[in-house]
Image: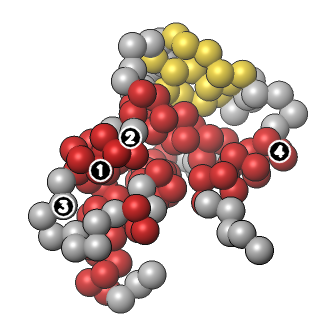
């Protein structure tokens, strides 16, 4: 039996829960994209690179699946979502075997994500390697 990659599992889960979801280009209030939970609407900023677009959409998908952050926990929720997105879009098996000196730009280009997400994925993998977590 083949294992479904985590990103495809996310998309399957999202599609299974989505009665209707609209994605549009526009001007989000903050950042590159935003989700309106009530309207089931994702607004993505115009002019993003492919890497930024991939990261922004997956970021908002994760928000949709996790639900709105509790009041006062918005920052904690953002950090958790950023970490989950980095793990989804740059899974450990896609990163160089030797992480020391790995180039986030090369990883971003290879995986078609933004440099920030590639760097975060490397940092998370290094931290997991240091603590022995998988």
Q: Residues within 10 Å of mark 2 (few under 14, many from 20)?
A: many
The tag earlier along the polypeptide, 4 or 2, is 4
**Mark 1 — residue?**
107
Q: Residue 52's image quarter?
A: top left
- The reply to whether dot 3 and dot 1 touch (C-beta < 8 Å) is yes
Asked if disc 3 and disc 4 are in contact, CB closer than 8 Å, the reply is no
Residue at 12% across, 64% down: 101
Spatial distance from mark 2 to mark 3, Cα to Cα? 15 Å
Say which residue label 3 marks.
102
Please identify the residue farthest to the right as the structure is shown. Answer: 19
Q: Nearer the viewer, residue 12 or 17?
A: 12
**Would residue 12 be seen by someone viewing this image from the given angle?**
yes
Q: Sequence-wise, which precedes: disc 1 or disc 2?
A: 1
User: Taking 27 as reference, is 114 left or right?
Assistant: left
The residue closer to the viewer here, 125 or 106, is 106
For the residues bearing labels 2 and 3, Cβ distance under 8 angstroms: no
In the foreground, 80 or 70? 80
Q: CA distance from mark 4 to mark 1?
A: 31 Å
Residue under label 4: 17
Of the image marks 3 and 1, the number of the one nearer the N terminus: 3
Quick one: label 4 or label 1, which is nearer the N terminus? 4
**Whether label 4 touches label 1, CB < 8 Å:** no
Q: Earlier in the sequence, mark 2 or mark 3?
A: 3
Image location (x, y in percent) of residue 44 = 51, 21
Mark in the foreground, 4 or 2: 2
Which disc is residue 113 wearing? Answer: 2
Few, some or many C-alpha atoms within 10 Å of disc 4 (few <14, some 14-19, many ≥20)?
few
Q: Is residue 11 above or below residue 92?
A: above
The residues bearing labels 3 and 1 have C-alpha atoms spaced at a distance of: 8 Å
Where residue 117 sits in the image (x, y, percent)? 34, 47
Q: Helix, strand, or loop for circle 2?
A: loop
User: Which of disc 4 and disc 3 is earlier in sequence?
Assistant: 4
């Amino acid at each position: 039996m083949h294992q479904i990659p985590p990103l495809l599992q996310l998309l399957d889960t999202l599609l299974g829960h989505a009665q209707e979801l609209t994605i549009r280009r526009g001007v989000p209030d903050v950042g590159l994209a935003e989700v309106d939970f009530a309207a089931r609407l994702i607004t993505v900023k115009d002019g993003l690179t492919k890497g930024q677009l991939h990261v922004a959409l997956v970021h908002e998908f994760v928000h949709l699946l996790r639900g709105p952050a509790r009041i006062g926990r918005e920052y904690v929720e953002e950090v958790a979502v950023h970490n989950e997105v980095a793990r989804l879009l740059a899974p450990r098996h896609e990163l160089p075997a030797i992480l020391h000196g790995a180039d986030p730009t090369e990883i971003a280009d290879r995986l078609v994500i933004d440099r920030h997400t590639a760097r975060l994925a490397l940092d998370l993998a290094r931290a997991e390697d240091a603590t022995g977590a998988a």
